[in-house]
Amino acid sequence: GAVVSQHPSRVICKSGTSVKIECRSLDFQATTMFWYRQFPKQSLMLMATSNEGSKATYEQGVEKDKFLINHASLTLSTLTVTSAHPEDSSFYICSAFIPGLAGGDTDTQYFGPGTRLTVL
Amino acid sequence: SQQGEEDPQALSIQEGENATMNCSYKTSINNLQWYRQNSGRGLVHLILIRSNEREKHSGRLRVTLDTSKKSSSLLITASRAADTASYFCATGDQAGTALIFGKGTTLSVSS
């Protein structure tokens, strides 16, 4: 079953509004989560690393004031796209490791189902 | 930034045939992972191979890793129409760090 969930799965908003995307780890605690973005027919690009209880680390070229990340608990990270514009339309995916996964591989990264954002 | 290239970018085969996809990367790695993505959907983890491993199998999947050439291959044997998807390799330079993805190979399997 899914170990990482995202909500919403799909959102359409008007230009200039803010959109919050939630990423939850199910049945495990994730001190670190990652946010990726995928434009149509392209690969995933890492946007930022979300650390519980501290500031997120953003990749070069990703505006931290536009993409606000909050990792307030060990099971929830949120990405808020502020003042969204059509060029922000994309597929946003979060991921997490499962530390100490019994019988599993702690280096395996599990991805959420993604959130498709469309900004009109 | 993206780690490297996948080859081919697109592959079309018939059911029952084998599909081979290649991935090259640029920097030293701790592990390399292969993922599948159906159109517009999330990622499904297929297999992880560590830098000290050369080959790994999982069902119809076979992954090889050549760290001297900084390359990996994914072989899907006896392909099925349900294997139609995009396949991405992703590298991790340390345990527990973010992954860097290749550009992906789009596989189409026709029945």
Image (tube, coloured by chain):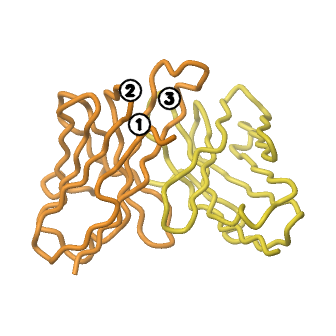
Badges 1 and 2, same chain: yes
Which chain contains the residue that carries disc 1? A
Q: Where residue B22 sits in the image (x, y, percent)?
A: 73, 55
For residue B91, which quarter of the picture?
top right
Is B54 rendered above or below residue B78?
A: above
Residue A88, numbered label: none
Q: Does the CB distance between marks 3 and 1 fall below 8 Å?
A: no
> Residue visible at 52% across and 52% down?
B43
Query: Quarter of the image containing the C terminus of chain B?
Result: bottom right
| Crowd around label 3: few <14 · some 14–19 · many ≥20 (10 Å) | few
- Of the chain colours in the picture, the one used for chain B is yellow
Residue B94, numbered label: 3
Q: Is residue B30 left or right of residue B108?
A: left
Q: Does the CB distance between marks 1 and 2 fall below 8 Å?
A: yes
| Crowd around label 2: few <14 · some 14–19 · many ≥20 (10 Å) | some
Residue A28, numbered label: 2
> Residue visible at 85% across and 68% down?
B15
Give the Cα separation between the discs numbered 2 and 3: 21 Å
**Type of amino acid at the residue the image marks with label 1:** Ala
Is B60 rendered above or below residue A9?
A: above
Q: Which residue is mark 1?
A: A96
Q: Where residue B87 sits in the image (x, y, percent)?
A: 63, 58
